[in-house]
Amino acid sequence: MKGILRLFLALGIIGLLLIGLYLLFPQPLPYDLAIIGGMVVDGTGNPWFKADVGIKGERITYIGVIPEREATEAIRGEGLVVSPGFIDIHTHSDRGLLANPRAENYLYQGVTTVIGGNCGGSSYPIGEHLEKLRQQGISLNFAILVGHNTIRSRVMGMKDVPPTPEELAEMKRMVELGMKQGAVGLSTGLKYVPGAYASTEEVIELAKVAAQYHGIYATHMREEGLGVIEAVKEALLIGEEARLPVHISHHKVMSADLWGASKETLRLIEEARSRGVEVTIDQYPYPATSTGLTVLFPPWSLVGGSEELKGRLSHPETRQKIKEAIVYSIVHDRGGSDIGNITITSFEADQSLEGKNLAEIARQWGLEPTPLNGAEIVMDIQLEGGGSAIYHCLNDEDIERIMRYRGAMVGSDGGITIFGQGVVHPRNYGTFPRVLGHYVREKGVLTLEHAIRKMTSLPAQTLRLPDRGVLRVGAYADITVFNPLRVIDKATWENPHQYPEGIAYVLVNGKVVISKGKHTGALSGYVLRREDKK
């Protein structure tokens, strides 16, 4: 009997010791964070379903029913959509991230990954830039394309001539180095100089290099207004000949003369897919573009750079030819036939003109608001250092037709902003919430599930970003939680520096970066290199 009592006593002591050890050294809970009771939209296009999402470290480890006591931290998701973090496939965020690594204007939209190096312009060397971002820390994920215009200008300057064999070999070497250092593909800006001076054959040769490293070809096409059909054909030919995926950036039809031509451009894209060419597109959901004023100038006038352009503008006969070309562009292409459609967004020499359209400036200068006088204003601004503008020249029917296309995704064509600084396009603050609020909830152009697929799994698939763009066990916990009844953009043309409403939480690699609509300061983003598994 005494032996039994001693045994029970010993077991009791052992039990107390175990309890003490547990209290001193508690076992970690199964989840660092759980999102409880949300409407899960997984990014694939499947219908939403109610579930809890469990996160451990940087990954999603469970989707199902999770007792709240099993998570160190919990987010209440009732009435909220839980979706993959949005991926912006088209940004100009390379340098902006160095200046503002918190990237508030993107994270407040629910964006967790941005792609830089678009339209032919990238930081270079690629590896050096990526390492700077990695060491500094960033609040969202970043990947980059290697820019053709950047490379061509370094090798050939602003010359309007074909490359010599030696120059072409050097450009190919630079593309290869960029790909080896982690670029996800090659981008071109064939509307801009010096890319405008490149032949289709030159681009094919460089795209072949990117193809060897399983990259994509992303293009700001040669034309997006007059000539858009031929430009689409060229983009498809480059992808077909170089044997790599083609991605057409910010697809649109600018010229009022061609509004409705998206029917034909989308038909050409579908035909190419039917014969085995992988083609995708992106767009921003606004009826206006934004870029430098030189887009109105004929490419021949920009040969040699700004100093040579100034020389041409000082020559009366040459200036007249340039003026005629600008007038034609205003009337038939990017100007939408009215100089009041062109608003100056940046002009360092006279910032009082920022935010005013050309018609307002003409009246301020005592001129009639005609295309001829608009061209004179544009040339004068260029002589004083140049500037940028917003161009109201798109058609809602084309925007919605392109948006519905199964291979179309959402891209802002914006950059990292400093809140309140400068006159910027509203897309910098509102692109993704605008799609969800205006085009999904208010207009019904897309279903919620299809819109989110265009923002998440489709760009991840296009860029070959493994374990991103979907909500599933094992995927990185890039997650956006938003109110589907409230999400909307607030940025306007008059007051663009306004954050959207309805984005409640944003997680980047398992860390909460936006909590109850406020930035936490976390720098949990990764630099995504082409070879990374991240």
Image (cartoon, rainbow, N blue to C red):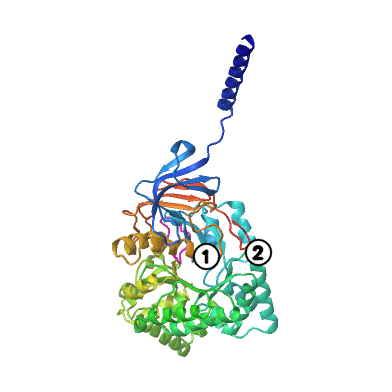
Residue farthest toward the top in the current orientation of the protein: 2
Say if the magenta span includes residue 416.
Answer: yes
- Label 2 or label 1, whichever comes before in sequence order: 2
Horizontal placement of 184 versus 396: left or right? right
Amino acid at circle 1: Gln
Residue 181 is tagged as: 2
Q: Mark 2 belongs to which amino acid?
A: Gln
Q: Residue at x 55, y 48 (%)?
A: 58
* x and y percentages locating residue 252 in the rendered image: 41, 75
- Whether 346 is drawn above or below 8: the answer is below
| Nearer the observer, 357 or 126 | 126
Q: Residue furthest right?
A: 166
Circle nearer the viewer, 2 or 1: 1
Q: Which segment is the magenta one?
A: 411-423
Q: Nearer the viewer, residue 61 or 464?
A: 61
Q: Which residue is mark 1?
A: 461
Q: Badge 1: few (under 14), some or many (20 or more) residues near its Cα, within 10 Å?
A: few
Q: Position of residue 52 (x, y in %)?
A: 43, 46
Vertical side of 70 occupied by 281: above or below:
below
Res. 523 in view: no
Visible in this render: residue 360?
yes
Q: CA distance from mark 2 to mark 1?
A: 21 Å
**Residue 210, quarter of picture:** bottom right
The residue at 69%/79% (across/down) is 169
- x, y percent for residue 492: 33, 62
**Under tag 1, what secondary structure?**
helix
